[in-house]
Image: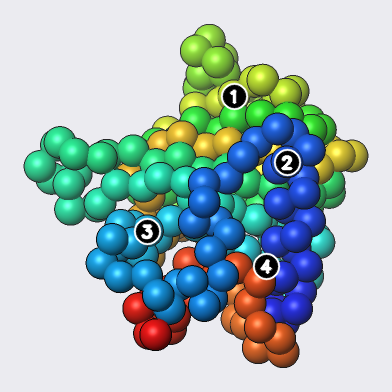
Amino acid sequence: MKRSEINQIMRAADAFFRSQNFHLPPFAYWSPDEWRKKGPEADEIVQHRLGWDITDFGRGRFCKCGLVIFTIRNGAVADLQAGRGKLYCEKILMLQHDQVCPMHFHWQKMEDIINRGGGDLHVQVYHSTPAEDVDDRPVTLRVDGVLRTVDAGTAIRLQPGESITILPGCYHKLWGWRHDVLMGEVSLVNDDDRDNRFLASVGRFATIEEDERPLFLLRDDYERFWGKD
Ligand SMILES: [Fe+2]
């Protein structure tokens, strides 16, 4: 993706979040120059990979297959063994209408996916087989705390306010219907480097072509700017 496209998507996502009365924390708006001046006080943002994450899953067609993610808080994977500390993660996401987040599951992370506003959100679910393919067994899960069993491959429609709990090993694919969706995620600690299994081979992260200055940094930009004054 070109940086100019990323900047444009950030502007649109920021306007959408505001239109839904969702407000991002201050570090969402630190400029590259401000990042250069930040010291160790900002280490949690860098090390826990908070902030903007915009991906086309390496497919080059963001409006069809992509996602804007802003990680608001996230713990440390190492704390999971200790069983104490910040073991949770919260994200806010924008899924454009007719844009798909491809089918994937997590080995470790359990997550609640929440429709926080905008259009309807569709969540298609399958169990995974031991060989990590989709399974044709019915899927039992909870939608806002209520137990439900659906056929494999069912797309569950979530209206604003509704949420679904996705267990580890459960394949899920997401898309917005007719309108952009403000999607929340509350989960166990998030580990994007090791805990995503995509059904089709996609890249989790976009490759970026620098054709203009970043508006705000993506979380993968921090190392190039943080404390480099
Ligand atoms: Fe997921």
Please state the horizontal and vertical placement of residue 69, each as a whole percent of the image.
58, 53
Q: Quadrant of the C terminus?
A: bottom left
**Residue annotated with mark 4:** 56
Left or right, 60 with reference to 177: left
The amino acid type found where label 4 is placed reads Asp
Mark 3 element type: helix
Tell which of 49 and 104 is nearer to you.
49
The amino acid type found where label 2 is placed reads Arg
Label whose residue precedes the other's in the sequence (3 or 2) = 2
Q: On residue 45, which mark appears?
A: 3
Label 1: how many residues lie within 10 Å, few (<14), some (14-19) or many (20+)? many
Label 2: how many residues lie within 10 Å, few (<14), some (14-19) or many (20+)? few
Label whose residue precedes the other's in the sequence (1 or 3) = 3
Cα separation, mark 4 vs mark 1, equals: 24 Å
CB atoms of marks 1 and 3 within 8 Å: no
Q: Residue at x 62, y 46 (%)?
A: 93
Label 3: how many residues lie within 10 Å, few (<14), some (14-19) or many (20+)? some
Tell which of 94 and 171 is nearer to you.
94
Cα separation, mark 1 vs mark 3, equals: 27 Å
Mark 4 element type: loop
**Residue annotated with mark 2:** 18
Please state the horizontal and vertical placement of residue 78, each as a whole percent of the image.
17, 53
Mark 3 lies within 8 Å of ligand 1 (Cβ measured) = no
Please state the horizontal and vertical placement of residue 177, each as a whole percent of the image.
84, 38
Q: Nearer the viewer, mark 2 or mark 1?
A: 2
Please state the horizontal and vertical placement of residue 34, each as a whole percent of the image.
49, 71
The amino acid type found where label 3 is placed reads Ile
**Residue annotated with mark 1:** 163
